[in-house]
Image (tube, grey):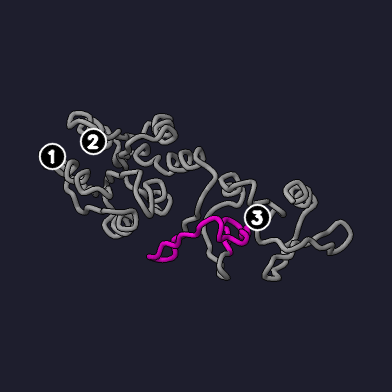
């Protein structure tokens, strides 16, 4: 019986690192390399277009790191993470039993990770990578930027440029630079990742960057609004007001 061929992509910003993986795969006719990517943007595009079975993914990359790549993928393939060393990442890997390689690694260690990943492709345990990425990112808070995918375009919004964030059912609307961007995420999940010294949950539906606050006005009895520097008005709950008083 012929072993089915697995399609794979290699993602690493270092050419030498990619060439090592390519060399280690050269003796495996059951693996077909369908793309090599030098950055996270290329990886997101390649996965969307090629839908590989397996991805060798570097974590420490400029522009988009490996965890941000995973965040932007709707359905990630099976992943073998590659890292120089990241204590939070390794902890997340071990908890979820995901294959990873610590640089530098031997051919034997590479083939071991490859075979483990190969056995899990197509099984329910093949892609716990979303959970790994979320856990590793949450351990390294506060969040410095928010990534939003709009069609084929990836928008990166630094935390300091955010005005406020509004809950819209299962989505959040991130307001920055006069524009609103939608992302599928719960407001409560994002709240735990943001810097509490800068971002305040002023209402069940709103998180405010306090650098944008101009004043707080009484709207009605026991009801207040936050007036932003651009004159935007946001409701402030009683709990939100108490939080604001503690910071201001």
Instruction: Name the quadrant containing residue 119.
Output: top left
Residue 75 on image: x %, y %: 38, 51
* Label 3 CA crowd tier, 10 Å (few <14, some 14–19, many 20+): many
Question: Residue at 65% of width from left, 55% of height from top?
Answer: 207
| Of callouts 2 and 3, the N-terminal one | 2
The CA span between labels 1 and 2 is: 10 Å
Labelled pair 2, 3 in contact (Cβ < 8 Å): no
Q: Is residue 148 above or below residue 127?
A: below
Question: Residue at 21% of width from left, 49% of height from top?
Answer: 15
Residue 77 on image: x %, y %: 32, 47
Give the residue pinned by disc 3. Answer: 207
Labelled pair 1, 2 in contact (Cβ < 8 Å): yes
Give the residue pinned by disc 1. Answer: 28
Q: Which residues are magenta?
A: 149-175
Find numbered disc 3 in the image and state the secondary structure of the residue it sits on.
strand
Magenta span: predominant SS is strand
Give the residue pinned by disc 2. Answer: 114
The CA span between labels 1 and 3 is: 51 Å
Question: Residue at 13% of width from left, 39% of height from top?
Answer: 28
| Of callouts 1 and 2, the N-terminal one | 1
Q: Quadrant of the N terminus?
A: top left
* Label 2 CA crowd tier, 10 Å (few <14, some 14–19, many 20+): many
**Which circle marks residue 231 in the picture?**
none
Q: Residue furthest right?
A: 221
The CA span between labels 2 and 3 is: 43 Å
Is 128 on the left-hand or right-hand side of 3?
A: right
Residue 144 on image: x %, y %: 51, 50
């Amino acid at each position: 019986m012929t072993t089915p061929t697995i399609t794979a992509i290699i993602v690493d910003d270092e050419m030498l690192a990619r060439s090592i993986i390519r060399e280690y795969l050269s003796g495996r006719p059951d693996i077909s390399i369908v793309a090599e990517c030098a950055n996270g943007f290329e990886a997101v595009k390649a996965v969307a277009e090629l839908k590989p079975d397996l991805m060798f993914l570097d974590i420490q990359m400029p522009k988009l790191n490996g965890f941000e790549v995973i965040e932007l993928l709707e359905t990630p393939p099976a992943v073998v993470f590659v890292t120089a060393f990241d204590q939070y990442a390794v902890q997340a890997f071990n908890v979820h039993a995901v294959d990873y390689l610590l640089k530098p690694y031997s051919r034997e260690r590479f083939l071991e990770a490859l075979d483990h990943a190969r056995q899990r492709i197509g099984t329910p345990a093949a892609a716990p990578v979303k959970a790994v990425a979320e856990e590793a990112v949450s351990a390294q808070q506060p969040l410095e930027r928010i990534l939003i995918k709009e069609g084929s375009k990836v928008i990166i919004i630094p935390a300091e440029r955010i005005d406020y964030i509004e809950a819209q059912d299962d989505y959040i609307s991130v307001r920055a630079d006069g524009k609103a961007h939608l992302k599928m995420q719960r407001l409560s999940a994002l709240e735990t990742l943001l810097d509490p010294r800068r971002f305040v949950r002023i209402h069940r539906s709103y998180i405010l960057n306090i650098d944008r606050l101009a004043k707080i006005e009484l709207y009605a009895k026991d009801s207040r609004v936050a007036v932003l520097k651009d004159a935007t008005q946001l409701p402030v709950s009683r709990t939100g007001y108490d939080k604001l008083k503690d910071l201001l």
